[in-house]
Image (spheres, helix red, strand yellow):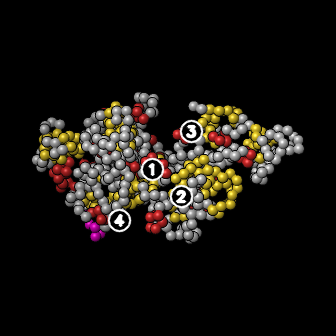
Amino acid sequence: METIEHFAHRHHPLVYIGQDKIQKDRNHNSKPHLCNVCWLPILSSPFYSCINGCDFFLHKPCAQLPDKVDHPYISTFLSLKINPHPNSTCKRCNKLCANIVYTTDIHYRFADYIVHPLCAVQVEIKIEHQSHNEHPLVAVCRDTLSLCDACGENHEGVFFSCKDCNFWIHRDCTLLPSIAKHPSHDHHLVLSYALSADFYRAYILRCDVCGGRFRGKGLYACAVDRDFHAHLKCVSSNMGNFTLADAELLIHLPHREGGYMYSSLAYRNLDNRSDRQKKWEIEKYHNHPLTFHQLTSSSDSSSVEALLMSYSRSLDKGLVCDACIQPIISRPYWECARLDCRYLLHDFCANIPSSVLAFGYRGSLYQDSNKYLFHSTFPCFFCQRPCNGLGYRAYINTYTTAMTDLETNPYTIAMADLEINPYTIAMADLECASAPHATTHSSHEQNYHILILTMQTELIPLSCCRELWPSSPWPFQPSASRTYRCVSCDYAIHAGCAFLPKKVSHKFDKHPLELMFTGSPNGKDECLCEVCEKDIDQQYWFYHCAICEQSFHVECIPTVGLLSKIKFGSTLDVSCHTDHPVALTRMLTVGNQRCSYCSEIIEGFIDDMNFCCSECDFWIHYLCAKSCNKEQYTSRPWYNCRI
């Protein structure tokens, strides 16, 4: 770790933050740091910062300024020091001087001769900025009157320009927050410096604040939908009480170990309820009394490897939350007091709100799934995975075309009488319900662009996968699906793919597997999956171990595959097997398994749900078990469940 001492910050040493360690404004919601010498933004250039976290930063070139310099207009040296006269002006540019200046050492004819450091020494400060991804930008430190290509307005002051092309952006436009609020609009606004031509042709007309035309390459667009657009100056001049801390919804994906995005739902519902009232409200999730457990982690390590190991151990022990279907690792949790019941609940999952605004729709927490859904299982409308945990239900009238074939599509929920209420019931699991409307993703971070959640109604090329779960017999393929789409280019990924964790574990490899976005990690043209032994299309995402050089399809890893949101082990009474209850299990096998209901033999590699009896050699397809109990779920007045 490289450290230096600097005369302007004698209390603590300064540590070097190189290009490989810079986060490049990934979160887009942190306050930009300013260099204490030139007062230009740090952005993505290498810099020094206080090792103790003080608000002191220096560009690398500014930290390496010479102690003394010659000056053409005076006969003595100028020394770099703390400004002896804080209200003085620079003798070269007549601007107010900051804390660090070049000045004379002797009080002679040129006493109090003070200049800005960058007026005395020519320094090249390069940055990488999301407004211009093609080339780095260089600071033009002299005051310049020019047209800013970002906002389309004339500015006077310091600019950043590209040496390879005629692109100029004013200093103030580089510091605009990537997500903001405006009093004239209810939703958050997302900043884009260069919208695609298709976006301009399809959506852009006039500014919704002032009514003027767009002349620059940048604008603010609504993060929820594309019905609001505004000039940069119209938003920056009147952001109301918005602060950068309000941009909490803009998070960076993927999560490093599988994510607990759904825990943010609980934080929205914090209040001053008494412990007795909380316990009463928690027990509404289950028919039996619940006991609280304060579980502490067995390992002090917070590394990804330790978390993945705890993750796997919890899965092996069956410590899976019945609400979010995620392992209980080190958090407090609730457990059913009855020994014959294995109901488990994260403490923060017990505090999720009863309603939430998910994907632009108001959804209510659905707790009666066991009454209306077969085995409490519903399809998540957004990630296309089946789930038997808690979920939110919303009525969406834009999906009526998804109800064209209710009998053949096992994952469609529709209103019973479309003439009375032509709406589709969409259910979202806890993870998808807590998904942000705007985010950034590592697969697209080289451009620093923001992705917003949109409705995919037309065929567009996706960068994550050819289609969701291509080999699954259970796909929910509506006419429109949710995708994260870049506001500045044509990059798009499925919402379900966006939530894939950065690292996962698999029993075939003792090391963590890392999510690969494109290309061959070892330079080989062919790549086989270690599980199914089929080719991996390397232009789409997959998981890979760099140490063992092993690769895996996303759908071949149980913790992130199609059935990753199903908790197995629950029992069911079926009319075709009255001797014993059958348990929900995972059928991960190769061929020659015969269903005791339909007598069909499943050929080939199968990863599917089924029910089996632990007392005798009986197993049955999931859909066949549903057919056995069909009468129990078809007499409801509200809607028919086709799950």
Q: Which residue is mark 3?
A: 18
Q: Quadrant of the C terminus?
A: bottom left
Q: Identify residue type, mark 3.
A: Gly
**Real-space Cα separation, disc 1 to disc 2, in angstroms:** 16 Å
**Labels 1, 4: front one:** 1
Q: Is residue 417 magenta?
A: yes
Query: Do callouts 1 and 4 mark residues in contact (Cβ within 8 Å)?
Result: no
Q: Residues within 10 Å of mark 4 (few under 14, many from 20)?
A: few
Mark 3 or 2, nearer chain start: 3
Residue shown at the point (48%, 58%) measured from the top left: 488
Task: Name the mark on residue 444.
Answer: 1
Task: Name the mark on residue 397.
Answer: 4
* Highlighted range, magenta: 415-420
Mark 3 or 4, nearer chain start: 3
In the rendered image of this protein, does residue 377 appear above or below residue 456? above
In the rendered image of this protein, does residue 335 appear above or below residue 441? above
**Quarter of the rendering containing residue 479:** bottom left
Mark 3 or 1, nearer chain start: 3
**Real-space Cα separation, disc 3 to disc 1, in angstroms:** 21 Å
**Real-space Cα separation, disc 1 to disc 4, in angstroms:** 32 Å
Q: Main secondary structure of the magenta part?
A: loop
Q: Residues within 10 Å of mark 1 (few under 14, many from 20)?
A: some
Q: Is residue 152 left or right of residue 295?
A: right
